[in-house]
Image: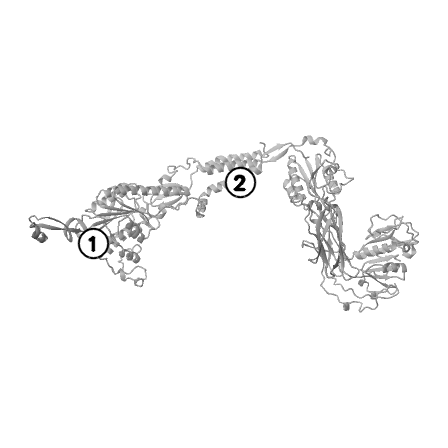
């Protein structure tokens, strides 16, 4: 049997010491008794007057000798060897996506994956190093090339399934980069492979998949929305449930509002199909809705979904314009929006732009820009919105980004612009619509934390108002600029960034997660009106509370502009001042994070071969034949030895305390009682 | 039989001096051994001696001799010199034969109380010597009340110190004072030699009461010697409870209180149980020997209440009754 520390066997030299201790005479306590007549037969060492005595047979001595032998063996770290089947540098990728929380393998796929990784690590060569990559929404390295198996175990134990899609391609790329540093490397992927195998990823080491997961029985809520009913008295709820199993299923869908059960429906779901449920008559006073699937499937994460009922508040848009009927018409068609108009000459301190959700400057700019979301159209001069460098005549349009959200459903391929202001793109903005020369025609961004958009041309100087794209672009722009100043009302995907509004006067916001933990956020930029929140890993309802504000409960009479002077108007010539917004700025707002991911809800195990095919056939690195030079794997024997040593210690304690044990047994009434007669023979 | 009475009956706790000693006790009686409660118990004792014995003075015990009591025993022919007052004239009138009436003689009895005063008796809890003194006092008190002669001797070293013989219930306090004066010996005690010395000082047959822990190599020999005197021998074998069931534990060096000899022992539960077995076997051996020699052997522990000793143990063994 080989030993990792054979010098520790010198500890066996303690054996004679133990024997010597047993041969040493005890320092006995003297007690005077009436007579030693009856004790003389018990004087086992009666005649030993020397400091040494004859060694007596003792079970305790035997146990102590065995204990010394075991401790010496333990310190010498004995092990057995066998051929290693893993490379010397191992990169373990653990899938932490939502589907790994499935319970078809008890207690969960992630636990099974963890166990299989630990089992596989026993085949690591002696001195092998392990890196651990957690494949979540953002893959990360939690252990980097360590030979300390304790750290590896701790890191594996700390991995939890996140309700998000794992970026396996990125995780494998990370693993490949780690493997490429070593000569004899291997990538071990513990996953259910319930995803589309990443393409265009080449791993510079052999990939071995430890696959978990067997079944696919799962039903999921894949959509959950709430909208006002046409009657405007109640709200309607839309729930979409998907059966991802190959067997039909019956599920009960429950709708809860602010913790009360509002409605329950039984749904029959065909295999691999969706069923939609519409529920009307949701009370108006409900703020948080929750949909639940009451059935028992193998993935619980997607059986609940939350929705925040958006507050019924009209958007107030101030158009500062000399008059553009196209723009006014497009804005007036926006739902839930009130349009106010003022001429540039009338815009001033009395206009109270802070009472509006959006201020649009059409070919005009005030001396100082309001700190509310702003859309500037053809700014006439250089301002913080951008430096005017000239005029563009009949510019050719460039190609916007294909996934630009502002241009969703907007087709600008036939747009012609007669004249546009030439602007230099400020640092805070991104180009949405460029010219072919690269000049920005439309750009947006957060200027000092305030959502701001700039359209470099007046719509009437183009054929945009004549196109279907115009009202949609206006709607998208308003939604982008106004939406950025509010908490999101639509469901947020787990792990996604959320831009949270910071009310005027607040120093920041405090976010309360679904598990009750809180996080204080400061503005993204100094003096900004928004804060970015990224810790959206938990599913559920998040509550955002402004910090540094007191609840004022604003009343109409507290309007800084005094009493409303005019009603809404759609004519820019009117000078309207809206009534103050009856919303407490210190009131908390909420948003929901829902899974709504069919890919993750589809827990059917995928193909391990596809993943393994991404790896190279041989180990990477300069030493190609390193596999033949691997040291063998070791099986440490200290655990059974330690267990035996512990058993010996316990046994020794029992032997040493056997008198007390016998007394306890007798006191409890077990065993033979012994009561010597004291009075009579 | 008339019970001895003392002024102790009138003593009440209110009569006690500030020191707490019973007021009726003479100053030479150790109040820690013989307190008021003890004496009250003694007054309730009943007396029993088993067989007629040969005594000396006229007493209350039935003697083997014929004598002058009122209890008729037998007739015998008249011979010259007989007391004419003892002739049965009624028989002469009927049978014309001179017959003399014989009556049972009543003599006193010598009760020898041998109290072991060796150093080992001063050990144990409760104190064995105190227990021995009280047991001797009880028996002596009973004997005095029966108009018997009580001889007290303490055994220490190789000799016996005999006190003056006492007779009559009025000498009860003297007996108690004599018992109080017994102190444990400083050196070793040879029980055989001390017993022989005591027997040489006791005249006539009677009752010999030995109160001892018998922790002596010659204990059996001493018992044989006592049995050989022809007297009725009662052995009260007193051991302390912790000598019967020891509570010692661990690695100890036991020092003999008499000889200073030491014994190294390692005591655990099993060793203590072996010791207890050994004590039981030793007591059984002594009991067997006593039975063979017609000795009344009474094994006792020093925590036995006096009432239990007298009314239970000694009565059960027909020592008193």
Closer mark to the observer between disc 2 and disc 1: 1
Q: Is residue A328 visible?
A: yes
Residue B256 x, y percent position in the rendering:
34, 43
Up/down of B123 relative to A63, above or below: below
Q: Residue A646: give its label.
A: 2
Q: Residue B147: give its label.
A: 1
Q: In what quadrant of the picture does the N terminus of chain A appear?
A: top right
Same chain for the residues under marks 2 and 1 in the image: no
Look at the numbered disc 1 and give the secondary structure of its residue: loop
Give the distance between the C-alpha atoms of the residues marked 2 and 1, in whole angstroms.
76 Å
Q: In what quadrant of the picture does the C terminus of chain A appear?
A: top left
Total of numbered circles in the picture? 2
B284 vs B169, nearest the viewer: B284
In the rendered image, the residue lying farthest to the front is B94
Up/down of B219 relative to A526, above or below: above
Residue drawn at x 31%, y 55% is B32
- Locate residue A343 relative to residue B236 in the image: left or right: right
Up/down of A150 relative to A551, above or below: above
Q: Is residue B268 visible?
A: no
Residue A90 x, y percent position in the rendering:
69, 37
Colour pattern of the rendering = one colour
Q: Are marks 2 and 1 in contact (CB under 8 Å)?
A: no
Mark 1 burial class by Cα count in 10 Å: few <14, some 14-19, many 20+: many
Residue A661 x, y percent position in the rendering:
46, 45
Chain under numbered label 2: A
Q: Locate residue A359: give its quadrant.
A: bottom right
- Locate residue B58 relative to residue A51 in the image: left or right: left
Residue A233 x, y percent position in the rendering:
77, 62
Chain under numbered label 1: B
A472 vs B100, nearest the viewer: B100
- Locate residue A120 relative to residue B296 in the image: left or right: right
């Amino acid at each position: 049997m080989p030993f990792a520390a054979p010098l520790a066997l010198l500890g066996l030299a303690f054996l004679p010491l133990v024997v010597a201790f047993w041969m040493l005479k005890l320092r006995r306590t003297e007690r005077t008794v009436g007579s030693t007549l009856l004790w003389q037969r018990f004087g086992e060492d009666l005649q030993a007057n020397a400091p040494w005595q004859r060694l007596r047979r003792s079970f305790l001595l035997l146990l102590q000798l065995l204990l010394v032998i075991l401790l010496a063996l333990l310190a010498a770290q004995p092990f057995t060897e066998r051929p290693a089947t893993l490379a010397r540098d191992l990169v373990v990728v653990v899938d932490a996506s939502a589907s790994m929380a499935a319970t078809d393998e008890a207690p969960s796929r992630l636990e099974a994956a963890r166990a299989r990784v630990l089992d596989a690590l026993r085949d690591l060569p002696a001195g092998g190093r392990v890196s651990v990559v957690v494949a979540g929404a953002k893959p990360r390295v939690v252990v980097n090339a360590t030979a300390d198996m304790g750290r590896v175990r701790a890191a594996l134990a700390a991995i939890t399934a996140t309700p998000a899609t794992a970026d396996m391609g990125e995780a494998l790329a990370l693993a490949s980069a780690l493997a490429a540093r070593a000569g004899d490397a291997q990538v071990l992927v513990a996953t259910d492979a319930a995803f589309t195998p990443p393409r265009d990823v080449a791993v510079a080491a052999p990939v071995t998949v430890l696959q978990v997961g067997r079944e696919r029985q799962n039903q999921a809520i894949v959509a959950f929305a709430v909208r006002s009913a046409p009657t405007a008295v109640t709200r309607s709820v839309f729930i979409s449930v998907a059966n991802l199993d190959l067997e039909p299923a019956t599920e009960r869908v429950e709708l809860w509002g602010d913790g009360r059960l509002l409605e329950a429906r039984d749904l029959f779901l065909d295999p691999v199909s969706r069923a939609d449920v519409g529920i009307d008559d949701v009370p108006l006073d409900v703020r948080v809705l929750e949909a639940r699937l009451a059935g028992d499937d193998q993935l619980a994460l997607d059986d609940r979904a939350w929705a925040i009922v958006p507050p019924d508040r009209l958007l107030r848009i101030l158009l500062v314009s000399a008059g553009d009927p196209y723009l006014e018409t497009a804005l007036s068609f926006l739902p839930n929006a009130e349009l106010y108009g003022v001429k540039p000459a009338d815009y001033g301190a009395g206009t109270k732009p802070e009472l509006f959700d959006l201020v649009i400057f059409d070919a005009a700019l005030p001396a100082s820009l309001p700190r509310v979301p702003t859309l500037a159209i053809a700014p006439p001069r250089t301002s913080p919105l951008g430096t005017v460098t000239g005029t563009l005549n009949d510019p050719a349009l460039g190609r916007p980004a294909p996934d630009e959200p502002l241009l969703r459903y907007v087709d600008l391929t036939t747009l012609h612009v007669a004249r546009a202001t030439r602007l230099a793109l400020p640092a805070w903005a991104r180009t949405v619509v460029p010219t072919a020369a690269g000049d920005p025609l439309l750009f947006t961004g957060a200027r000092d934390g305030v959502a701001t958009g700039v359209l470099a041309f007046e719509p009437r100087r183009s054929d945009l108002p004549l196109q279907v794209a115009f009202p949609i672009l206006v709607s998208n722009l308003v939604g982008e600029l106004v939406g950025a100043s509010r908490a999101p009302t639509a469901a947020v995907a787990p792990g996604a960034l959320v831009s949270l509004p910071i009310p005027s006067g607040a120093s920041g916001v405090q976010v309360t997660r679904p598990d009750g933990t809180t996080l204080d956020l400061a503005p993204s930029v100094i003096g900004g009106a928004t804060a970015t929140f990224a810790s959206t890993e938990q599913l559920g309802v998040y509550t955002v509370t402004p910090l540094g504000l007191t609840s004022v409960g604003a009343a109409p009479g507290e309007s800084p502009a005094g009493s409303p002077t005019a009603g809404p108007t759609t004519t820019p010539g009117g000078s309207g001042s809206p009534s103050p917004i009856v919303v407490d700025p210190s009131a908390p707002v909420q948003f929901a994070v829902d899974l709504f991911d069919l890919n993750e809800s589809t827990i059917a195990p995928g193909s391990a071969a596809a993943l393994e095919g991404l790896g190279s056939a041989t180990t990477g690195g300069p030493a190609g034949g390193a596999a033949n030079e691997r040291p063998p794997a070791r099986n440490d024997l200290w655990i059974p030895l330690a267990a035996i040593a512990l058993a010996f210690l316990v046994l020794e304690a029992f032997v040493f305390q056997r008198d007390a044990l016998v007394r306890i047994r007798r006191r409890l009434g077990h065993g033979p009682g012994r009561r010597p007669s004291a009075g009579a023979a | 039989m008339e019970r001895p009475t003392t002024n102790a009956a009138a003593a009440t706790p209110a009569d006690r001096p500030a020191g707490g000693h019973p007021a009726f006790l003479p100053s030479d009686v150790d109040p820690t051994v013989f307190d008021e409660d003890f004496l009250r118990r003694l007054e309730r004792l009943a007396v029993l001696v088993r067989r007629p014995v040969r005594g000396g003075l006229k007493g209350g015990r039935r003697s083997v001799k014929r004598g002058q009591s009122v209890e008729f025993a037998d007739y015998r022919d008249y011979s010259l010199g007989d007391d004419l007052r003892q002739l049965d004239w009624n028989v002469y009138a009927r049978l014309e034969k001179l017959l003399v009436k014989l009556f049972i003689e009543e003599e006193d009895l010598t009760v020898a109380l041998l109290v072991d005063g060796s150093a080992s008796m001063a050990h144990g809890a409760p104190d064995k010597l105190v227990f021995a003194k009280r047991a001797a006092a009880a028996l002596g008190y009973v004997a005095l009340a029966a108009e018997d002669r009580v001889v007290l001797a303490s055994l220490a070293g190789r000799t016996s110190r005999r006190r003056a013989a006492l007779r009559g219930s009025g000498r009860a306090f003297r007996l108690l004072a004599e018992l109080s004066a017994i102190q444990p010996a400083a050196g070793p005690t040879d029980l055989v030699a001390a017993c022989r010395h005591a027997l040489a000082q006791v005249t006539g047959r009677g009752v010999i009461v030995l109160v001892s822990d018998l922790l002596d190599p010659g204990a059996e020999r001493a018992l044989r010697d006592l049995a050989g005197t022809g007297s009725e021998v009662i052995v009260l074998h007193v051991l302390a409870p912790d000598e019967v069931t020891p509570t010692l534990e661990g690695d100890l060096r036991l020092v003999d209180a008499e000889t200073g000899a030491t014994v190294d022992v390692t005591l655990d539960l099993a060793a203590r149980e072996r010791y207890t077995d050994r004590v039981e076997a030793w007591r059984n051996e002594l009991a067997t020997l006593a039975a063979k020699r017609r000795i009344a052997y009474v094994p006792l522990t020093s925590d036995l209440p006096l009432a239990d000793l007298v009314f239970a143990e000694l009565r059960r063994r027909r020592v008193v009754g």
